[in-house]
Each structure stands twice: as C-alpha cells, then as structure tokens.
Amino acid sequence: MTGDPDDPVTRGETFSFSTATGMTAQLYGSPFDARVEAVDPATGANFYLVLAPDGGPLEPRTYTGATAWPYYEGGPGMVLNSNLGGCDGDLVGSFTIQDIRFGPYNYLEKLDATFEQHCSGGAPAARGEVHLTNPPALPPLDPQATVAGTGAVVMPDGLVTVRGTLTCSQAALVFVDAHVQQNGRLVGLDRAEVRCLAGQAVPWTATRTEPSGVRLRPGDADVRLEISGRDPFYDVYVRVVPPLFPVRLDAA
C-alpha cells in the first residue's frame, strides 16, 4: 500500500504486510462486505479495510464512486483507516475485486482486490492491493442420526430407553433430545450428550430415568429426535429434526 504525502491514512509512506514475516492479517465478511485487518507487531502499524458492493453480492468487477462505509447509499461503500489516521468525514474511492470465494455460511475463503481512496474528495490518495486466503472451508457439521430398530421399556413404570448412532463431518459436542410416541402418548427422554467425531458413527443412548406419568407399553412406537449443537468451524448453531424413526419397544 502506498499513499500521497497529504493522504492522512498513509502520510505518504509505503506499507507491506505479509503473514510469512510474522505479521497478522484477518479476512472476514459476507457477500455484502469484505473486511481486512492487517497488523505489524514490530512497528505497531495497522490498517482496516472494508469493501462493500452496491446492492448485490460482491463479485469480480470494478466498483467506482464508492463512498464512506457504513454510511454509503445508492452505490458501493469502502473505508480504509490506519493507526496513522483516517478520512475525517466524506471520502470517494474505487476498488476492483479480482477474485472472491465463499464457502458455507458465507465463509470468506479468498479475496484478491485493488483499491484507491481519496479523503473528502481531494486529490491525495491511498492505493493498495490485498491478496488473502483463509483456511479451506470445511463441510458443515451436518449431524445425521440413526435409531436402533428396538428399544426397551421397563414395566410397570414404562421407563423407555432408545439407542442409535450420530455421524458428523467435524468433531463437535452435539445434543440429542428424543421423544417416544405410542398411540397418542408422548414421553420425553433425558438429553443425550454426544462427542461427535468427524466421519465416525458415535453411539448414543437416551433414557427416561424418572416416571413421567405417561406409561408406554411393549410394542410399536415412533422416536422423534431433535439434534442440536454449535458448528465449531463456522461458529453457528445447528438444529436438525429428522423424520420419525419407527422402533419396537421390548419389555426389559
């Protein structure tokens, strides 16, 4: 990144940031803005850049007439600040998205872009380019459950136990809430806590440890599951409600 002598963001200096030399850079955003933070721990230099499109998602093309983010209207927006300073008020700029890639949940994988910013519409400018790649996007957590074809019911209290497996695309803590329904009667079982392993079928067991007042009997029933947890890579809450699982309850 370079700037003209009267540019308040760069003060006429030239800067280069690379994670290969111990500097830090973060790339994040969504289809509607890309954000970059770059820091040089040795010198304390840091820059914050936001590039925002004009209504649609960011795509490879040139955006002109950008105004100050987040106050822009009717066109693209941008802002470039540093530890040296920033635009005090209005700005005008342009940027070119050369390449941008998103993964699941709008995870920003890659950004290649050039940019130019003029504070208060003046002639002095800050100019630069950014080439950043985040770690490859992982598959979403996507917990998938099975339920064994037979369960157990303890007589005479009707305490029920059902079992199954849970498969996830990542290692994560996942919860299984099971309800068993039979002839209009519904019993909720104690929550099962499952430590999912990527690509492995992990067993789970759900049971009712205290009488509920609703007594189920040996015979056919259905199991309703609600599977929930936080995707550790994308940091999003995941909830899955699969179709009912038929099960036969045997007396235990």
Image (cartoon, rainbow, N blue to C red):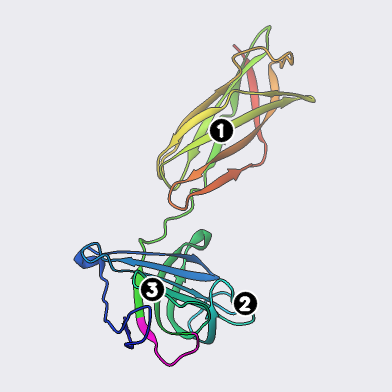
Residue 90 coordinates in the image, percent (x, y): 53, 81
User: In the picture, residue 56 is in which quadrant?
Assistant: bottom right
Quick check: 21 above or below 14? above
Q: Which residue is mark 2?
A: 55
Magenta residue span:
120-128
Residue 70 coordinates in the image, percent (x, y): 56, 71
Could you say which disc has been placed on residue 176 in the image?
1
Numbered circles on residues, count = 3
* Viewer-nearest of discs 3 and 2: 3
Q: Amino acid at mark 1?
A: Val
Residue, x 80% and y 25% (percent of image)?
184
Give the mark nearer the N terminus: 1 vs 3: 3
| Crowd rating for badge 3 (residues with CA inside 10 Å; few <14, some 14–19, many 20+) | some
Residue, x 56% and y 33% (percent of image)?
176
**Is-magenta flag for residue 237?**
no
Give the mark nearer the N terminus: 1 vs 2: 2
- Is 221 left, or right, of 130 in this rendering? right
